[in-house]
Amino acid sequence: KSQGRRHELWVVLTIIILALLTGNVSYKQITSFCKAEEEKLIEMLSITSKTLPSYSTIRRVMLGINIIDIQSILTSIINNYYSQKSKEDWIAIDGKSLKNTLTDYEEKSQNMLNVVSWFSQETKLIIKVEIQENKKKSEIAVVLSMIENCDLSNKVFTLDALHCNKEITKTIIE
């Protein structure tokens, strides 16, 4: 029976980071990642209980951590692996709202966290991540800032309709 099991915090955080690095961003996706990679994770992390954290455990840990700290850890890992000056690459840019980050249910314009990520077709990895609060900065402004701070040579971008505007197009072309 797996109820009442305790997992060391470093194990849960490592699993969360590995899941995020492979594009699994929701609690359900992270739990599915655990199930799909269960044997590898147990062996790699030397988990003696032979069980991985449940959905509830993953959710509780994620609610208790500072997502900005996780973003900086992910960014440093990604920067060590992915060189912006690499060969040709096709990059898909998209933003997603994080469920359960809504802070003001009664407000007309609601505030929540959004994650803007860049997915590399070449490496099959998320190579850039930025988290923003939609009341402080728009997704368009975040994408524009990310593009401005990137070496664009040999890169082809795909963006959703939200980003089909003159300012972003001009920045990419220049």
Image: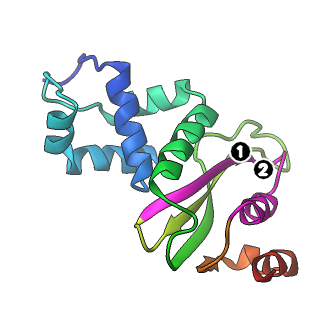
Q: Which residue is mark 2?
A: 134
- Please state which amino acid type lies under the numbered disc 2: Asn
Q: Secondary structure at mark 2?
A: loop
Q: Is residue 130 left or right of residue 31?
A: right
Disc 1 versus disc 2: distance between alpha carbons? 6 Å
Q: Is residue 83 magenta?
A: no
**In the figure, residue 85 lies in which quadrant?**
bottom right
**Residue drawn at x 59%, y 48% as measured from the top left:** 98
Q: Which residues are magenta?
A: 125-150
Which quadrant of the rendered structure holds the N terminus? top left
Query: How far across and how far down the image is residue 26, in percent?
Result: 46, 48
Q: Residue at x 51, y 77 (%)?
A: 89
Among the two numbered marks 1 and 2 on one chain, the one whose residue lies closer to the N terminus: 1
Q: Which mark is residue 112?
A: 1
Q: Is residue 37 visible?
A: yes
Q: Position of residue 42 (x, y in %)?
A: 17, 34
Which of the two residues, 128 or 76, is positioned nearer the viewer here? 76
Q: Is residue 128 left or right of residue 143?
A: left
Residue 69 in the image: above or below residue 48: below
- The quarter of the picture where the C terminus appears is bottom right
What amino acid is labelled 1 in the image? Met
